[in-house]
Image (cartoon, rainbow, N blue to C red):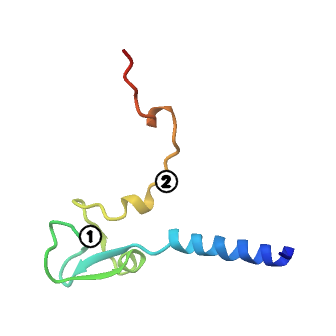
Amino acid sequence: MKKSNIITFAFLLLFGLMSHFVSAQTVYVTEKGKKYHKKNCSIVNEGKKGMELAEAKKAGYTACGNCKPDDKAAAPAKKAGAADKPKVKTK
């Protein structure tokens, strides 16, 4: 394989992976509400409309305190450390 083909393949693979992880988060709003919610939020059962998180924030909606829809998106990735390792019982 030529070097240029390898570079092109690596670029396309990297771009595909990035687009998968950077996809927009969908949140749900109601016509009269002022909060945005996760799809399965117990506070909103009917009349919800999906939109991107950035769009909801731009429209003036704020996060629901019950389902906290943007917690995962805003939280940095946690690094594995000694505290994350499973504890093994010894006799």
Using the image as rendered, state which of residue 62 and residue 4 is in the foreground.
Answer: 4
Lateral position of residue 68 relative to residue 84, left or right = left
- Could you tell me which quadrant the C terminus lies in? top left
Residue at x-position 40% and y-position 72%? 25
Q: Quadrant of residue 19?
A: bottom right
Residue at x-position 63% and y-position 74%? 15
Q: SS of the residue at dot 1?
A: loop
Q: How many marks?
A: 2
Using the image as rendered, state which of residue 6 and residue 38 is in the foreground.
Answer: 6
Residue at x-position 52% and y-position 36%? 81
Residue behind mark 1: 37
Residue at x-position 39% and y-position 80%? 55
Q: Is residue 34 above or below residue 65?
A: below
Q: Amino acid at mark 1?
A: His
Looking at the image, tell me whether mark 2 or mark 1 is earlier in sequence order: 1
Lateral position of residue 8 relative to residue 40, left or right = right
Q: SS of the residue at dot 2?
A: loop
Q: Quadrant of residue 38?
A: bottom left
Q: Residues within 10 Å of mark 1 (few under 14, many from 20)?
A: many
- Measured as percent of width and height from the top left, residue 47 is found at 16, 83
Q: Quadrant of residue 1?
A: bottom right
Q: Is residue 89 above or below residue 84?
A: above
Query: How far separated are the C-alphas under marks 2 and 1?
Result: 20 Å
- Measured as percent of width and height from the top left, residue 39 is found at 25, 72
Residue behind mark 2: 76
Judged from this view, the residue extending furthest toward the top is 91
Q: Residues within 10 Å of mark 2 (few under 14, many from 20)?
A: few
Mark drawn on residue 55:
none
- Measured as percent of width and height from the top left, residue 21 is found at 51, 68
Judged from this view, the residue extending furthest toward the front is 1
Q: Amino acid at mark 2?
A: Pro
